[in-house]
Amino acid sequence: MDADAIKHSLEGSGLRCTAQRHAVMAFLMDHKGHPTAAEIFEAVNRLDPRSSRATTYNNLRDLVQAGLVREVAVEGRAARFDAKGMRHHHFICDRCGNVEDMEWYDVPGPASGSLGKRILRECELIFRGLCTKCAPRRVARQGS
């Protein structure tokens, strides 16, 4: 995504396009994995040493609230972040904590009335287990 597209995306979501917010969004759009807030801060700070940790974390919060970025909660580990582009689910490895994108398919919504007065924003699946790197190690140990 180019600089103008990021600017329009931010402004279209009601956010000002500050240099730091733009840098966070640009990093997430270019990054293939699911970085932590600390990793995002380090990358943005290398480009602009004036960028503070608090500003980076606040921008991540704002981007999540605006619906431009998804926070992926990984139990017992730091949350990871993912720029929302194409819709997808996630697979989280129990051993190494790696977060992988999984193909999207529609998830049936909850039965009418089962949420009470709650308002559902979205429904996402998170698959948990052993990734392709960790699964063979477990099988090899069990066979020994």
Image (cartoon, rainbow, N blue to C red):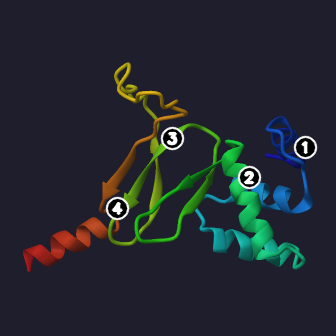
- Disc 1 and disc 2 in contact, CB within 8 angstroms: no
Using the numbered discs, state the Cα–Cα distance from disc 3 to disc 4 in whole angstroms.
17 Å
- Residue position marked by numbered label 2 in the rendering: 62
Task: Please state the horizontal and vertical placement of residue 143, each as a whole percent of the image.
Answer: 8, 74
| Front residue of 18 and 43 | 18
Instruction: Name the amino acid, label 2.
Output: Asp
Using the numbered discs, state the Cα–Cα distance from disc 4 to disc 1 in whole angstroms.
37 Å
Crowding at mark 4 (Cα within 10 Å: few <14, some 14-19, many 20+): some
Q: On screen, 115 above or below 8?
A: above
- Residue position marked by numbered label 1 in the rendering: 4
> What SS does tag 3 mark?
strand
Q: Is residue 108 visible?
A: yes
- Residue position marked by numbered label 3 in the rendering: 88
Task: Please state the horizontal and vertical placement of residue 22, each as a whole percent of the image.
Answer: 84, 56
Quarter where residue 8 is shown: top right
Task: Please state the horizontal and vertical placement of residue 144, each as a whole percent of the image.
Answer: 8, 80
Q: Earlier in the sequence, mark 3 or mark 1?
A: 1
Closer mark to the observer between disc 1 and disc 2: 2
Q: Residue at x 53, y 64 (%)?
A: 79
Instruction: Name the amino acid, label 4.
Output: Cys
Q: Earlier in the sequence, mark 3 or mark 4?
A: 3
Instruction: Name the amino acid, label 1.
Output: Asp
- Residue position marked by numbered label 4 in the rendering: 131
Q: On screen, 144 above or below 58?
A: below
Q: Earlier in the sequence, mark 2 or mark 4?
A: 2
Q: Earlier in the sequence, mark 1 or mark 2?
A: 1
Horizontal relation, residue 80 to residue 16: left or right: left
Quarter where residue 21 is shown: bottom right
> What SS does tag 4 mark?
loop
